[in-house]
Amino acid sequence: MTARTRLWVLLISTPVIAFAIIGGYLGQAMTRDDTYQHLRVFEDVVSLVLNNYVEAVDVKKAMKGAMNGLADNLDPDSSFLPATLASAYESNAPAGPADVGLELSRQYYLRVVTARDGSPAAKAGIRTGDFIRAIDTRSTKDISVYEGDRLLHGQPGTKVSLLVIRGNAADPHEVDLVRERVTSPELTSKMADPVTGYIHVMEFSKRAPAQLKQAVDALARTGASRYVVDLRGASRGDLDDGLAAARLFVKTGALTIRETKGNVKETVAAQAGDGAVTAPVVLIVDQSTARAGEVFAAALDGNKRAEMIGEHTLGSAARQRLVKLPDGSAMLLSYLRYLTPGGVSIHEKGLQPEVEVDAGEIDFGAPPPGTDPLLVRALEYLARKKAA
């Protein structure tokens, strides 16, 4: 290996090694030969590329690709952030006052978790499960969720173009959206039938427990003796705010288990005064049920306070931590994940409903169906449960 090549290898390898040390992912494993062997293989690959590739290598670009690949092989919520994005994340810099109303995850490309009701994205027909292949012609293959969210924000009235895939990857749809200040309620409620209250939670904020209690009480005064809590689109909000809301329904038992590195587990249990709502409850869930919504659902389901009806949930229930690198870039790493009361990880696995209902595929541009099959099934299930 030439002196020049060794210098390039050192420049490229240093951030990777620093990440491993700072993030603590090597820990005691650094003393094992297999860990060193992987680093040696990486060094050999870099050397081979620099000495054999037909063109001069853009080391910065190659390094970014390597770090993106490393993060992609962890989980959808972990990512590599270049220095400018790392600085914005660390300082909690605002992304822009307007957006298009999309909550995102990653699955090779950016993927839609939910399009908020009344938002430009929802009005354009973008739905849960759609893939965003490009934002303003820029491929999202190497864009983190954090960066994608910032790209969708901007000034009110400005435009953003999305290349959307639904079903057939060979038939993408170009959708032009105008950013606006998206405001949507955190919770709505109504009577679904003379004895059933329907509560749709879209966000778990710190106000969620009080809002839920107010909705339950108001519906009870109207005649509700049982409740459907719809968690479709419930992906926003802090995970612990989902737990706080679950306390309203769970009187005793574990609400969740928090797990950190080394299989260290902390049980979060119901406390005195919890469980104020005792009426029968069913939950509607689907792929747009994520994060705080999943933690809430797992707490009720795991304590047999409610059954889930609908589709498998997303599987995003972890906290991330920013690990800075010497050049100012950073790794955003999942360091804590939430488990069900029974000790099963929610993160990357999701929750399986007791009663599966396929909501069906809607062609791009087609109007939504006139009936809601998940709500219909939830009401039928509650009626049968009451009769039994």
Image (cartoon, grey):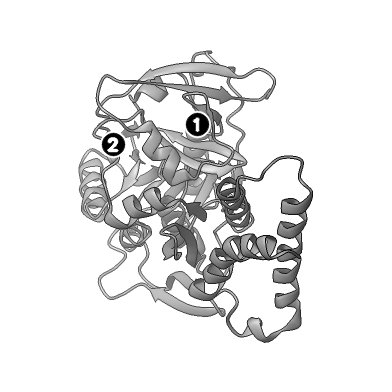
Name which residue lies at 30% across and 20% down.
Answer: 158
Nearer to the camera, 153 or 116: 153
Q: Which residue is mark 2?
A: 188
Farthest residue, direction front: 3
Percent coordinates x, y for residue 274 in the rendering: 29, 68
Residue 217, image x and y in percent? 22, 48
Tell which of 19 and 292 is nearer to you: 19
Residue shown at 37%/49% (left/top)? 84
Q: Closer to the camera, 206 or 140?
A: 140
Percent coordinates x, y for residue 225 in the rendering: 33, 46
- Asked where in the image residue 43 lies, by quadrant, the reply is bottom right
Determine the residue positioned at 24% across, 28% down.
181
Residue at the spot of label 1: 376
Q: Is residue 260 visible?
A: no
Q: Is label 1 in a helix, a strand or a loop? A: helix
Q: Amino acid at mark 1?
A: Val
Q: The disc labelled 2 sits on which kind of residue?
A: Thr
Q: Nearer the viewer, mark 1 or mark 2?
A: 2
**Sequence-first tag of 1 and 2:** 2
- Disc 1 and disc 2: Cα gap in Å? 18 Å
